[in-house]
Amino acid sequence: MNSEERDLLFASVNKYLTNSYNYYDFRLDGSASSESVMKMYKETCDLGWSAFLFSEEVGGFGGAAIDIAELFEKFGKHRVVTPYLESQITAGTILSCIGEKGSAVLGELIAGNITLCVLGSSDRYSDSGPIALNLDTLDDPACDYGAVPWAPVADKMLVVASNKGEDMLLLVDRQSPSISVERRVGVDGSLVGKVTINDLRRDSCEILAEGSAVSDIVKIACLKTSIALCAEAVGAMESLLRQTVEYTKTRKQFGQPISNFQVLQHMMANMFVAHTTSHEMLKGIASEISTDADYLAYEREIMLLKHKINKESKYVRHSAMQCHGGIATTDELMLGHYLKRLVVIDNYFGGPHVDMDRINREAA
Protein backbone atom coordinates (compact mmCIF):
# COMPACT_ATOMS: atom_id res chain seq x y z
CA MET A 1 0.00 0.00 0.00
CA ASN A 2 1.39 3.40 -0.94
CA SER A 3 1.24 6.46 1.31
CA GLU A 4 -1.74 7.97 -0.53
CA GLU A 5 -3.83 4.81 -0.10
CA ARG A 6 -2.78 4.63 3.53
CA ASP A 7 -3.87 8.24 4.14
CA LEU A 8 -7.23 7.54 2.50
CA LEU A 9 -7.80 4.50 4.71
CA PHE A 10 -7.09 6.39 7.91
CA ALA A 11 -9.23 9.29 6.76
CA SER A 12 -12.12 6.81 6.46
CA VAL A 13 -11.30 5.37 9.90
CA ASN A 14 -11.39 8.84 11.45
CA LYS A 15 -14.65 9.66 9.68
CA TYR A 16 -16.29 6.42 10.79
CA LEU A 17 -15.23 6.68 14.43
CA THR A 18 -16.08 10.39 14.65
CA ASN A 19 -19.50 10.20 12.99
CA SER A 20 -20.73 6.64 13.57
CA TYR A 21 -19.26 5.55 16.89
CA ASN A 22 -20.39 6.40 20.41
CA TYR A 23 -18.91 4.42 23.29
CA TYR A 24 -22.17 4.43 25.26
CA ASP A 25 -23.91 2.65 22.39
CA PHE A 26 -21.38 -0.18 22.33
CA ARG A 27 -20.25 -0.81 25.92
CA LEU A 28 -21.69 -3.92 27.51
CA ASP A 29 -23.30 -4.32 30.90
CA GLY A 30 -25.15 -7.14 32.58
CA SER A 31 -28.12 -7.05 30.20
CA ALA A 32 -26.67 -5.53 27.00
CA SER A 33 -26.39 -7.51 23.77
CA SER A 34 -23.15 -7.82 21.83
CA GLU A 35 -24.98 -7.57 18.48
CA SER A 36 -24.09 -3.92 17.89
CA VAL A 37 -20.40 -4.62 18.58
CA MET A 38 -20.32 -7.59 16.22
CA LYS A 39 -22.19 -5.62 13.54
CA MET A 40 -19.52 -2.90 13.72
CA TYR A 41 -16.81 -5.58 13.65
CA LYS A 42 -18.18 -6.96 10.38
CA GLU A 43 -18.73 -3.51 8.85
CA THR A 44 -15.19 -2.37 9.58
CA CYS A 45 -13.72 -5.60 8.24
CA ASP A 46 -15.67 -4.96 5.03
CA LEU A 47 -14.12 -1.49 4.95
CA GLY A 48 -10.66 -3.06 4.91
CA TRP A 49 -9.56 -2.36 8.48
CA SER A 50 -8.73 -5.99 9.20
CA ALA A 51 -6.85 -6.49 5.91
CA PHE A 52 -4.72 -3.49 6.85
CA LEU A 53 -3.34 -5.52 9.78
CA PHE A 54 -1.91 -8.30 7.58
CA SER A 55 0.76 -8.51 4.92
CA GLU A 56 0.09 -9.15 1.24
CA GLU A 57 1.62 -12.64 1.61
CA VAL A 58 -1.36 -13.77 3.71
CA GLY A 59 -4.11 -11.83 1.95
CA GLY A 60 -3.88 -8.35 3.48
CA PHE A 61 -2.41 -5.07 2.28
CA GLY A 62 -0.50 -3.75 5.31
CA GLY A 63 0.77 -5.63 8.30
CA ALA A 64 3.73 -3.53 9.43
CA ALA A 65 3.85 -2.65 13.12
CA ILE A 66 3.40 1.05 12.34
CA ASP A 67 0.10 0.21 10.58
CA ILE A 68 -1.13 -1.72 13.59
CA ALA A 69 -0.01 1.04 15.96
CA GLU A 70 -1.81 3.78 14.03
CA LEU A 71 -5.13 1.91 13.89
CA PHE A 72 -5.10 0.94 17.56
CA GLU A 73 -4.09 4.43 18.60
CA LYS A 74 -7.36 5.59 17.07
CA PHE A 75 -9.20 2.77 18.85
CA GLY A 76 -7.78 4.03 22.13
CA LYS A 77 -8.59 7.66 21.35
CA HIS A 78 -12.27 6.87 20.69
CA ARG A 79 -12.49 4.11 23.36
CA VAL A 80 -13.60 1.51 20.83
CA VAL A 81 -15.15 -1.69 22.20
CA THR A 82 -14.20 -4.40 19.71
CA PRO A 83 -12.74 -7.94 19.51
CA TYR A 84 -10.08 -6.73 17.03
CA LEU A 85 -7.21 -7.16 19.50
CA GLU A 86 -7.91 -10.75 20.50
CA SER A 87 -9.34 -11.92 17.19
CA GLN A 88 -7.47 -10.08 14.44
CA ILE A 89 -4.14 -9.43 16.17
CA THR A 90 -3.49 -12.32 18.59
CA ALA A 91 -5.36 -15.11 16.78
CA GLY A 92 -4.68 -13.69 13.31
CA THR A 93 -0.94 -13.55 13.95
CA ILE A 94 -0.88 -17.17 15.06
CA LEU A 95 -2.74 -18.26 11.93
CA SER A 96 -0.50 -16.21 9.63
CA CYS A 97 2.63 -17.77 11.19
CA ILE A 98 1.37 -21.34 10.67
CA GLY A 99 1.25 -21.13 6.89
CA GLU A 100 -1.01 -23.23 4.69
CA LYS A 101 -2.80 -24.97 7.57
CA GLY A 102 -4.17 -21.69 8.85
CA SER A 103 -4.73 -19.93 5.51
CA ALA A 104 -8.40 -20.90 5.04
CA VAL A 105 -9.41 -19.79 8.54
CA LEU A 106 -7.28 -16.66 8.24
CA GLY A 107 -9.07 -15.68 5.03
CA GLU A 108 -12.43 -15.96 6.79
CA LEU A 109 -11.05 -13.97 9.72
CA ILE A 110 -9.77 -11.10 7.57
CA ALA A 111 -13.12 -10.98 5.77
CA GLY A 112 -14.86 -10.59 9.14
CA ASN A 113 -16.90 -13.75 8.66
CA ILE A 114 -15.64 -15.34 11.87
CA THR A 115 -14.26 -14.30 15.25
CA LEU A 116 -11.54 -16.16 17.13
CA CYS A 117 -10.06 -16.12 20.60
CA VAL A 118 -6.89 -17.67 22.00
CA LEU A 119 -6.70 -19.93 25.04
CA GLY A 120 -3.16 -19.91 26.39
CA SER A 121 -2.27 -20.44 30.04
CA SER A 122 -4.71 -20.74 32.91
CA ASP A 123 -3.98 -17.09 33.74
CA ARG A 124 -3.30 -14.72 30.85
CA TYR A 125 -1.95 -12.19 33.34
CA SER A 126 0.96 -14.40 34.40
CA ASP A 127 3.86 -16.38 32.98
CA SER A 128 2.37 -19.79 33.72
CA GLY A 129 2.88 -22.14 30.79
CA PRO A 130 0.28 -23.90 28.62
CA ILE A 131 -2.25 -26.10 30.39
CA ALA A 132 -1.58 -29.83 30.05
CA LEU A 133 -4.24 -31.60 28.00
CA ASN A 134 -4.26 -35.33 27.40
CA LEU A 135 -5.94 -35.82 24.03
CA ASP A 136 -5.63 -39.61 24.16
CA THR A 137 -7.17 -40.40 27.55
CA LEU A 138 -10.79 -40.39 28.58
CA ASP A 139 -11.95 -38.63 31.73
CA ASP A 140 -9.26 -35.96 31.44
CA PRO A 141 -9.75 -33.42 34.27
CA ALA A 142 -11.49 -30.19 33.31
CA CYS A 143 -9.13 -27.32 32.40
CA ASP A 144 -10.14 -23.83 33.47
CA TYR A 145 -8.78 -21.06 31.23
CA GLY A 146 -10.27 -18.27 33.30
CA ALA A 147 -11.84 -15.13 31.84
CA VAL A 148 -11.06 -14.91 28.10
CA PRO A 149 -11.96 -11.68 26.24
CA TRP A 150 -14.71 -12.11 23.61
CA ALA A 151 -14.92 -15.88 24.09
CA PRO A 152 -18.77 -15.87 24.13
CA VAL A 153 -18.90 -14.55 20.54
CA ALA A 154 -15.97 -16.56 19.16
CA ASP A 155 -16.76 -19.01 16.38
CA LYS A 156 -13.51 -20.93 16.86
CA MET A 157 -10.83 -21.11 19.52
CA LEU A 158 -7.09 -21.46 19.19
CA VAL A 159 -5.88 -23.56 22.11
CA VAL A 160 -2.23 -23.55 23.18
CA ALA A 161 -1.72 -26.74 25.18
CA SER A 162 0.87 -29.21 26.35
CA ASN A 163 0.17 -32.85 25.44
CA LYS A 164 2.54 -35.39 27.03
CA GLY A 165 5.21 -32.71 27.38
CA GLU A 166 4.95 -31.44 23.80
CA ASP A 167 3.46 -28.03 22.99
CA MET A 168 0.53 -28.11 20.57
CA LEU A 169 -1.62 -25.54 18.83
CA LEU A 170 -5.21 -26.70 18.35
CA LEU A 171 -8.19 -25.27 16.50
CA VAL A 172 -11.47 -26.09 18.23
CA ASP A 173 -15.00 -25.16 17.25
CA ARG A 174 -16.75 -23.00 19.82
CA GLN A 175 -19.80 -25.30 19.69
CA SER A 176 -17.76 -28.40 20.59
CA PRO A 177 -19.27 -30.30 23.54
CA SER A 178 -15.85 -30.14 25.18
CA ILE A 179 -16.02 -26.33 25.39
CA SER A 180 -17.99 -24.52 28.07
CA VAL A 181 -18.21 -20.70 28.10
CA GLU A 182 -19.85 -18.68 30.86
CA ARG A 183 -20.66 -15.13 29.74
CA ARG A 184 -19.35 -12.27 31.86
CA VAL A 185 -18.65 -8.56 31.44
CA GLY A 186 -15.17 -7.17 31.97
CA VAL A 187 -14.31 -4.19 34.13
CA ASP A 188 -13.68 -2.16 30.97
CA GLY A 189 -17.15 -2.78 29.51
CA SER A 190 -16.06 -5.52 27.09
CA LEU A 191 -17.38 -9.07 26.85
CA VAL A 192 -15.45 -11.93 28.47
CA GLY A 193 -16.16 -15.59 29.02
CA LYS A 194 -15.04 -18.06 31.66
CA VAL A 195 -13.83 -20.92 29.48
CA THR A 196 -13.55 -24.55 30.56
CA ILE A 197 -12.34 -27.48 28.43
CA ASN A 198 -13.36 -30.99 29.40
CA ASP A 199 -12.46 -34.29 27.64
CA LEU A 200 -11.10 -32.77 24.43
CA ARG A 201 -10.18 -35.52 21.95
CA ARG A 202 -8.02 -35.53 18.82
CA ASP A 203 -10.98 -36.23 16.56
CA SER A 204 -12.82 -33.13 17.81
CA CYS A 205 -10.08 -30.61 17.04
CA GLU A 206 -7.53 -29.78 14.36
CA ILE A 207 -3.82 -29.81 15.23
CA LEU A 208 -2.25 -26.79 13.52
CA ALA A 209 1.29 -27.01 14.92
CA GLU A 210 3.39 -29.11 17.29
CA GLY A 211 6.78 -28.97 18.96
CA SER A 212 9.23 -26.13 19.50
CA ALA A 213 7.73 -23.93 16.74
CA VAL A 214 4.63 -23.33 18.87
CA SER A 215 6.45 -21.23 21.48
CA ASP A 216 7.92 -18.88 18.86
CA ILE A 217 4.55 -18.47 17.15
CA VAL A 218 2.86 -17.63 20.44
CA LYS A 219 5.66 -15.25 21.39
CA ILE A 220 5.32 -13.33 18.11
CA ALA A 221 1.56 -13.07 18.67
CA CYS A 222 2.10 -11.76 22.21
CA LEU A 223 4.67 -9.18 21.08
CA LYS A 224 2.42 -7.93 18.27
CA THR A 225 -0.47 -7.75 20.73
CA SER A 226 1.75 -5.71 23.06
CA ILE A 227 2.39 -3.18 20.27
CA ALA A 228 -1.37 -2.86 19.71
CA LEU A 229 -1.98 -2.47 23.46
CA CYS A 230 0.68 0.23 23.73
CA ALA A 231 -0.86 2.09 20.81
CA GLU A 232 -4.33 1.88 22.35
CA ALA A 233 -2.96 3.24 25.62
CA VAL A 234 -1.27 6.15 23.81
CA GLY A 235 -4.56 7.02 22.09
CA ALA A 236 -6.42 6.91 25.41
CA MET A 237 -3.78 9.16 27.00
CA GLU A 238 -4.30 11.71 24.23
CA SER A 239 -8.04 11.80 24.90
CA LEU A 240 -7.56 12.10 28.65
CA LEU A 241 -5.19 15.04 28.16
CA ARG A 242 -7.59 16.79 25.78
CA GLN A 243 -10.58 16.28 28.10
CA THR A 244 -8.61 17.53 31.09
CA VAL A 245 -7.45 20.71 29.34
CA GLU A 246 -11.00 21.45 28.15
CA TYR A 247 -12.48 20.85 31.60
CA THR A 248 -10.00 23.07 33.45
CA LYS A 249 -10.77 25.91 31.02
CA THR A 250 -14.50 25.78 31.81
CA ARG A 251 -14.50 24.85 35.52
CA LYS A 252 -14.24 27.97 37.66
CA GLN A 253 -13.11 28.43 41.23
CA PHE A 254 -12.52 31.66 43.12
CA GLY A 255 -13.91 33.52 40.12
CA GLN A 256 -11.46 32.17 37.53
CA PRO A 257 -10.90 29.02 35.45
CA ILE A 258 -8.92 26.41 37.36
CA SER A 259 -6.59 26.21 34.33
CA ASN A 260 -5.04 29.42 35.72
CA PHE A 261 -3.79 27.57 38.81
CA GLN A 262 -0.09 26.90 38.49
CA VAL A 263 -0.17 23.48 40.13
CA LEU A 264 -2.69 22.24 37.55
CA GLN A 265 -0.70 23.81 34.72
CA HIS A 266 2.35 21.85 35.87
CA MET A 267 0.30 18.67 36.13
CA MET A 268 -1.11 19.04 32.61
CA ALA A 269 2.35 19.88 31.26
CA ASN A 270 3.62 16.61 32.74
CA MET A 271 0.66 14.78 31.22
CA PHE A 272 1.60 16.24 27.83
CA VAL A 273 5.23 15.12 28.26
CA ALA A 274 4.11 11.61 29.30
CA HIS A 275 1.85 11.26 26.25
CA THR A 276 4.35 12.73 23.78
CA THR A 277 7.22 10.59 25.07
CA SER A 278 5.08 7.45 24.87
CA HIS A 279 3.90 8.29 21.35
CA GLU A 280 7.42 8.90 20.06
CA MET A 281 8.79 5.73 21.66
CA LEU A 282 5.95 3.70 20.14
CA LYS A 283 6.47 5.26 16.72
CA GLY A 284 10.23 4.72 16.88
CA ILE A 285 10.03 1.01 17.69
CA ALA A 286 7.02 0.26 15.46
CA SER A 287 8.70 1.85 12.44
CA GLU A 288 11.54 -0.69 12.71
CA ILE A 289 9.25 -3.75 12.57
CA SER A 290 7.88 -4.78 9.19
CA THR A 291 7.68 -8.60 9.34
CA ASP A 292 6.67 -11.17 11.95
CA ALA A 293 10.29 -12.28 12.36
CA ASP A 294 11.27 -8.74 13.37
CA TYR A 295 9.20 -9.01 16.55
CA LEU A 296 11.55 -11.62 17.99
CA ALA A 297 14.55 -9.41 17.20
CA TYR A 298 12.92 -6.49 19.07
CA GLU A 299 11.50 -8.52 21.96
CA ARG A 300 13.29 -6.66 24.74
CA GLU A 301 12.53 -3.24 23.22
CA ILE A 302 8.81 -4.09 23.02
CA MET A 303 8.75 -5.28 26.62
CA LEU A 304 10.48 -2.07 27.75
CA LEU A 305 8.03 -0.03 25.68
CA LYS A 306 5.03 -1.66 27.34
CA HIS A 307 6.51 -1.17 30.80
CA LYS A 308 7.25 2.51 30.06
CA ILE A 309 3.81 3.23 28.57
CA ASN A 310 2.07 1.46 31.47
CA LYS A 311 3.98 3.74 33.86
CA GLU A 312 3.20 6.92 31.91
CA SER A 313 -0.46 6.03 31.39
CA LYS A 314 -0.83 5.52 35.14
CA TYR A 315 0.38 9.06 35.74
CA VAL A 316 -1.88 10.49 33.02
CA ARG A 317 -5.04 8.75 34.19
CA HIS A 318 -4.44 9.59 37.86
CA SER A 319 -3.70 13.24 37.03
CA ALA A 320 -6.83 13.48 34.85
CA MET A 321 -8.95 12.10 37.68
CA GLN A 322 -7.41 14.55 40.15
CA CYS A 323 -7.97 17.57 37.89
CA HIS A 324 -11.62 16.62 37.37
CA GLY A 325 -12.30 16.05 41.06
CA GLY A 326 -15.44 14.19 42.15
CA ILE A 327 -17.13 14.46 38.74
CA ALA A 328 -14.54 12.02 37.37
CA THR A 329 -16.18 9.15 39.25
CA THR A 330 -19.55 9.53 37.51
CA ASP A 331 -20.56 7.00 34.88
CA GLU A 332 -21.76 9.75 32.53
CA LEU A 333 -18.26 11.15 32.12
CA MET A 334 -16.02 9.28 29.66
CA LEU A 335 -12.97 9.78 31.86
CA GLY A 336 -13.65 6.80 34.09
CA HIS A 337 -14.18 4.47 31.10
CA TYR A 338 -10.76 5.38 29.72
CA LEU A 339 -9.26 4.77 33.15
CA LYS A 340 -10.79 1.29 33.40
CA ARG A 341 -9.49 0.31 29.97
CA LEU A 342 -6.00 1.58 30.82
CA VAL A 343 -6.02 -0.52 34.01
CA VAL A 344 -6.86 -3.60 31.91
CA ILE A 345 -4.09 -2.76 29.42
CA ASP A 346 -1.66 -2.22 32.30
CA ASN A 347 -2.31 -5.76 33.54
CA TYR A 348 -2.51 -7.50 30.16
CA PHE A 349 0.21 -10.22 30.08
CA GLY A 350 0.97 -9.28 33.66
CA GLY A 351 1.27 -6.10 35.71
CA PRO A 352 4.38 -3.95 36.17
CA HIS A 353 6.19 -6.52 38.34
CA VAL A 354 5.64 -9.37 35.87
CA ASP A 355 6.72 -7.12 33.00
CA MET A 356 9.91 -6.21 34.80
CA ASP A 357 10.66 -9.86 35.60
CA ARG A 358 10.43 -10.66 31.88
CA ILE A 359 12.75 -7.77 31.02
CA ASN A 360 15.31 -8.88 33.58
CA ARG A 361 15.20 -12.48 32.34
CA GLU A 362 15.69 -11.30 28.77
CA ALA A 363 18.69 -9.19 29.80
CA ALA A 364 20.31 -12.03 31.78
Image (tube, grey):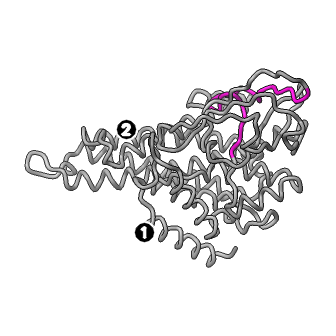
Proximity of marks 1 and 2: CB atoms separated by less than 8 Å = no
Of helix, strand and loop, which one carries label 1?
helix
Q: How many marks?
A: 2
Question: Which residue has dot 1 on it?
Answer: 19
Q: At which x and y percent is residue 199?
A: 81, 28
Image quarter for residue 64?
Answer: bottom right
Q: Nearer the viewer, residue 289 or 199?
A: 199
Q: Is residue 81 above or below residue 160?
A: below
**Quadrant of the rendered image containing residue 179:** top right
Disc number for residue 318: 2
Q: Main secondary structure of the magenta part?
A: loop
Name of the residue lying farthest toward the bottom = 4
Give the residue type at disc 2: His
Of 350 and 184, nearer the camera is 184
Q: Is residue 84 visible?
A: yes
Q: Position of residue 185 (x, y in %)?
A: 50, 38
Asked if residue 351 is among those painted magenta in the image, a careful observer would answer no
Q: Residue at x 79, y 56 (%)?
A: 105
Residue 30's disc number: none
Could you tell me residue 314's position as x and y percent? 44, 38
Q: Which residues are magenta?
A: 117-136
Which corner quadrant holds the C terminus?
Answer: top right
Please, what is the three-letter code of the amino acid marked with disc 1?
Asn
Q: Secondary structure at mark 2?
A: helix
Task: Please name the residue shown 54% across and 41% down the image.
Answer: 345
